[in-house]
């Protein structure tokens, strides 16, 4: 290995400006309470693989079928990533090359659809992602989009309404939660079924959420959310779509795969197969429930009345504060989360009536239920006094002290 490989100290003398920014980011991650549901802290082993010499290698193609010489070690890591991912999710075919979740979705869509075809996806304003048909995204630009949302009363998916929407638009695509039900809906109108598990992949890997793989034609995920790997995507599919997906990822959408990221995906998948990962995911769920219950005990309204996963959406309309102002006040107090539209929100998305909280990072640090109670108290204190700098500063110091009692990466 060449000198100083993967060491941040090498950067310190080579590029003090970038080093300083990275160091400041590390301090931010260490000292603030991070409740963004879609983020996580990757393990030191994942970071090491991602910072490795594999970034130097071009490996266009697939293991055993590359367009460049010298790919034997690239083949090893990609094969490991594929095998481990198959073992986790039981997929017939896995492509670990998508650079991101968006590209993982794009590959799945375009492997069976043509521009102008119809898709039915969950509305962005009600829980879907940009790539599920938003007008400003390739999915909304290329396809004829129909959307479904949640029921106004229960704030959960009304599957009869989805069935009706599917019959009206006859899509060749849909997105899911109750997997057998979505499979039945998709089948009844001759649609393909794609399940995007970007958020819940870690819970599924740990067996704590139903696995859509047996029911769906395509399953896509990011690897950096609950799954706690490097930033990236994966497209899984039934064997019959394997060729189409592989052709779409490369050469259709991408050039050379990011081999250092694929190595880091392989490491993360190994971690996801371990008993300690299951214990971690269990704590993610327990902590999310504790956060939701604590907030409800303080009079906050949780959309749909609770959570079964790692995240929750808080409707602040009864608290006299917008999502935007809540987000800003909490940020000033060292509590980082995101404003979020609530179902049927009357405020524009840039203001929004809600905030979204997630437990993946605080759980990675080893925090448990007592800390969740503490976090709820801090959040509540800020939201009661969003305009009082003294309170925000007090909470910032308390949040920092709480964070500093925990490592960045706890071993479960
Ligand atoms: C459900 C879902 N799908 C896809 C994506 C896209 O992932 P990426 O940001 O890696 O493109 C996200 C990211 O937030 C997501 O939440």
Image: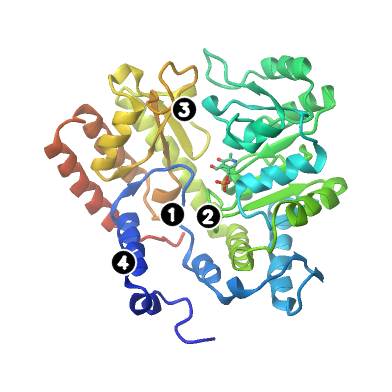
Disc 3: CA contacts within 10 A as few (<14), some (14-19) or many (>=20): some
Let me know if residue 323 appears in the view.
yes
Q: Residue at x 52, y 19 (%)?
A: 155
Which of the marked residues, 2 or 1, is nearer the chain's N terminus? 2
Residue at mark 2 to residue at mark 4: CA–CA distance: 25 Å
Disc 2: CA contacts within 10 A as few (<14), some (14-19) or many (>=20): many
Residue that label 3 marks:
306
Instruction: Identify whether 30 is placed above or below 72.
Output: above
Residue that label 4 marks:
20
Q: Measuring from the top left, give residue 163's x and y in whole percent.
A: 73, 18
Where, by quadrant of the figure, is residue 294 drawn?
top left
Which of the marked residues, 4 or 3, is nearer the chain's N terminus? 4
Q: Measuring from the top left, give residue 292's x and y in whole percent.
A: 40, 32
Q: Residue at x 30, y 41 (%)?
A: 375
Residue at mark 4 to residue at mark 3: CA–CA distance: 41 Å
The foreground one among 248 and 226 is 248
Q: Measuring from the top left, give residue 17's x and y in whole percent.
A: 32, 68
User: Tag 1, which secondary structure?
Assistant: helix
Disc 4: CA contacts within 10 A as few (<14), some (14-19) or many (>=20): few
Q: Report the mark closest to the observer, 1 or 4.
A: 4
Residue that label 2 marks:
228
Specify the label residue 364 is tagged with. 1
- Count the marks: 4
Q: Report the mark closest to the observer, 3 or 2.
A: 2
Which of the marked residues, 3 or 1, is nearer the chain's N terminus? 3
Let me know if residue 406 appears in the view.
no
**CB under 8 Å between discs 3 and 1:** no
Residue at mark 1 to residue at mark 4: CA–CA distance: 25 Å
Q: Residue at x 60, y 30 (%)?
A: 134
User: Tag 3, which secondary structure?
Assistant: loop
């Amino acid at each position: 290995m060449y000198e100083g490989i993967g060491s941040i100290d090498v950067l310190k003398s080579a590029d003090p400006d970038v080093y300083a920014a990275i160091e400041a980011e590390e301090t931010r991650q260490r000292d603030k309470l991070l409740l963004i549901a879609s983020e996580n802290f990757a393990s030191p082993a994942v970071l090491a693989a991602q910072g490795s010499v594999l970034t130097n290698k071009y490996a266009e193609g697939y293991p055993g079928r590359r367009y460049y010489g010298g790919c034997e070690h690239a083949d090893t890591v990609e094969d490991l990533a594929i095998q481990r991912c198959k073992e986790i999710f039981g997929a017939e075919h896995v492509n670990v090359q998508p650079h991101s979740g968006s590209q993982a979705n794009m590959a799945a869509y375009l492997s069976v659809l043509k521009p102008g075809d119809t898709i039915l996806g969950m509305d962005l304003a009600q829980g879907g992602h940009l790539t599920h048909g938003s007008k400003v995204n390739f999915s909304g630009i290329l396809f004829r989009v129909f959307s479904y949302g949640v029921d106004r009363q229960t704030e959960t998916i009304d599957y009869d309404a989805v069935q009706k929407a599917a019959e009206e638009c006859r899509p060749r695509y849909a997105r899911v939660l109750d997997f057998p039900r979505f499979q039945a809906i998709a089948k009844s109108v001759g649609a393909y079924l794609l399940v995007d598990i970007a958020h819940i992949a870690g819970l599924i890997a740990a067996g704590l959420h139903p696995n859509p793989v047996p029911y769906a034609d395509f399953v896509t995920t990011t690897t950096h959310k609950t799954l706690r790997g490097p930033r990236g995507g994966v497209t899984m599919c039934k064997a019959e779509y394997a060729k189409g997906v592989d052709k779409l990822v490369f050469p259709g959408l991408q050039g050379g795969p990011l081999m250092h990221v694929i190595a880091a995906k392989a490491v993360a998948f190994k971690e996801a197969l371990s008993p300690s990962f299951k214990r971690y995911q269990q704590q993610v769920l327990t902590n999310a429930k504790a956060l939701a219950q604590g907030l409800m005990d303080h009079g906050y309204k949780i959309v749909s009345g609770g959570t079964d996963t790692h995240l929750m959406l808080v409707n602040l309309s009864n608290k006299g504060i917008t999502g935007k102002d809540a987000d800003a006040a909490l940020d000033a107090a060292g509590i980082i989360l995101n404003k979020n539209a609530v179902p049927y929100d009357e405020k524009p998305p840039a203001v929004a009536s809600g905030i979204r909280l997630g437990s993946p990072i605080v759980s990675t640090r080893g925090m448990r239920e007592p800390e969740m109670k503490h976090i709820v108290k801090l959040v509540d204190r800020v939201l009661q006094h969003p305009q009082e700098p003294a309170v925000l500063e007090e909470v910032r110091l308390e949040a920092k002290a709480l964070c500093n009692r925990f490592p960045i990466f706890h071993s479960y």
